[in-house]
Image (cartoon, coloured by chain):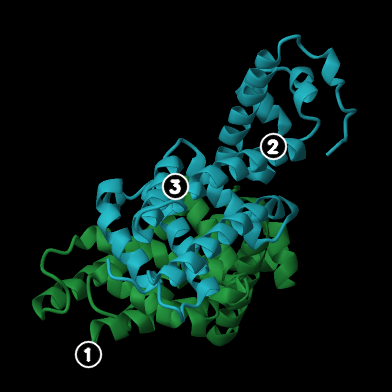
Chain colours: A green, B cyan
């Protein structure tokens, strides 16, 4: 990927809100392209076409495909942080876990969200540079889960001998698997998933559903 | 992809076992290439190089990349059928489910198996021709699970009001998610997965672990 000169921010359009809108327009178009053609398959040209912008216009915001991917990873980090916050707070642990997971499933029903996630997980398996950009998200989610579970052990909601790291990994893996599959599977509507997931999570956590 | 003339089987090498070995050599090489570069990214040339065969030699066995993918799908169908058979038979349902799932996880630890599975799942999401070749496997696994669960309801091992289709989808999704993740996650060794998975499956099935 050729590295282009960084645009002078001061030369851009006068209103910041217009700039933000342009930026969002590009990132949304890029998500569509990555979902359709993969991170490797999608070209800057395809992204320009989808965003209905000239290459010159697009390069003022993002000098490379890598820069776009990094910006998407940043958006995903923020989205995940917001979602995982629902796991904290008051009320029974199982209810908080369920809010978080169901919110994630709902988000994954956005057009392209699931395909993008499949791409991210394929890149993570390959341990590629792209994969690494997204791995951080996983780590920060784990940190919050560990904190929440340690509290639950203290309050007696979870058994004291729980294998926390394996528990966290299992839940992440199972929830990701369900999120990916729900898109094309009519048997995994949110309403039908809910009671089964509750028992699944309770089982993994060693609680009663 | 250009369609080459089908080779005359009778003109091939005299010993069937040598032919089989050649065929296996090509399919193993193709799996490695697909795992590394994806179904779309891998070329016949890359597969030839990996198999250490000339294009002429390879085309005697497979006229196109599609034919190779179809042969791999066929191998996967056989492997899945064999594995899912462990779900039938005698003994408690939970033990049979666990044998099947743990066998699947062990198989997925083969080099490249996981990356290939991630590729297959990305293609299935895109509902592409490649994805459809593998979708059948999923259907046949579902049929056997449904049969096994109906028996379990009859014997009282599972509650009579179970939402069977959603239960099957949830288990497939969760197990696939765990299979994919276990490769790079040291917290998901088979020994640590086992007790958590048992509680997960029991929870989804509405049984006691």
Q: What residue occupies the far front of the structure in this picture?
A: B155
Determine the residue positioned at 79% across, 34% down: B64
Mark 2 crowd level (few <14, some 14–19, many ≥20, 10 Å Cα): some
Compared to residue A49, the image places residue B87 above or below, namely above
Determine the residue positioned at 75% across, 66% down: A49
The answer to which quarter of the image holds residue A112 is: bottom right
Query: Alpha-carbon distance for marks 3 and 1?
Result: 39 Å
> Circle 2 sits on which residue?
B71
Name the one closer to the observer, B123 or B162: B162
Q: Which element is circle 2 on?
A: helix
Q: Earlier in the sequence, mark 3 or mark 2?
A: 2
> Circle 3 sits on which residue?
B104
Compared to residue B37, the image places residue A119 above or below, namely below
> Circle 1 sits on which residue?
A90
Q: Which tag is nearer the camera, tag 1 or tag 2?
A: 2
Q: Mark 2 and mark 1 in contact (Cβ < 8 Å)?
A: no
Q: Which element is circle 3 on?
A: helix
Query: Alpha-carbon distance for marks 1 and 2?
Result: 54 Å
């Amino acid at each position: 990927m050729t590295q282009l000169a960084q645009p002078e921010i001061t030369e851009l359009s006068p209103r910041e809100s217009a700039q933000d809108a342009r930026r969002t327009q590009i990132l949304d178009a890029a998500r569509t392209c990555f979902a359709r053609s993969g991170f490797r398959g999608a070209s800057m040209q395809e992204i320009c076409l989808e965003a209905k912008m000239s290459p010159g216009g697009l390069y003022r915001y993002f000098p490379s495909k890598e820069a776009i991917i990094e910006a998407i990873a940043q958006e995903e980090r923020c989205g995940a942080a917001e979602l995982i916050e629902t796991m904290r707070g008051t009320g029974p642990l199982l209810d908080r876990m369920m809010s978080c997971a169901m919110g994630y499933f709902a988000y994954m029903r956005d057009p392209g969200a699931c395909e993008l996630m499949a791409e991210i997980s394929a890149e993570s398996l390959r341990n590629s540079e792209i994969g690494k950009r997204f791995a951080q998200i996983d780590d920060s989610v784990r940190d919050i889960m560990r904190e929440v579970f340690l509290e639950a052990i203290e309050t007696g909601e979870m058994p004291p001998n729980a294998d926390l790291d394996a528990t966290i990994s299992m839940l992440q893996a199972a929830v990701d698997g369900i999120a990916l599959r729900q898109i094309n599977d009519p048997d995994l509507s949110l309403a039908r998933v809910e009671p089964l997931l509750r028992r699944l999570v309770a089982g993994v956590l060693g609680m009663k559903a």
